[in-house]
Amino acid sequence: MRFSSLVAAIAFSALLSVPAFALDAAQPTPGPAPAADAAAKAAKSSDCYKQADLKNLHGDKRRQFHHECMKAQ
């Protein structure tokens, strides 16, 4: 009797876990950014670095400027 109770408990728990796996599979996984977005980001970064060059920024100030510039655009 004890063995059949164990088998029933395992079967019941397996049935309960199936919907949880189904929910995980239904959610889309984020993929890599499209090439157009990467190219646009690279162009924006280059523009920010050119602006930093014009302002003669170096080191931490240049990095901070680039960071703020990327967020602003």
Image (cartoon, rainbow, N blue to C red):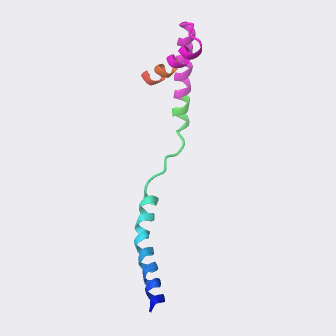
Quadrant in the picture for residue 52: top right
Provide residue 20's location: percent of width, then percent of height.
Answer: 42, 64
Q: Is residue 50 magenta?
A: yes
Provide residue 3's location: percent of width, then percent of height.
Answer: 48, 88
Residue at 56% x, 26% y: name it.
42
Q: Is residue 64 magenta?
A: yes
Quadrant of the drawing holding the N terminus: bottom left
Q: How many numbered marks are there?
A: 0
Say whether residue 56 is left or right of residue 16: right
Magenta stretch secondary structure, dominant: helix
Residue 32 vertical position relative to residue 20 in the rendered view, above or below: above
Residue 16 vertical position relative to residue 8 in the rendered view, above or below: above
Residue 1 vertical position relative to residue 11 in the rendered view, above or below: below
Provide residue 7's location: percent of width, then percent of height.
Answer: 47, 84
Quadrant in the picture for residue 14: bottom left
Residue at 56% x, 36% y: name it.
35
The residue segment tinted magenta is 40-65
Quadrant in the picture for residue 16: bottom left
Residue at 53% x, 38% y: name it.
34
- Which of the pair 31/10 is nearer the observer? 10
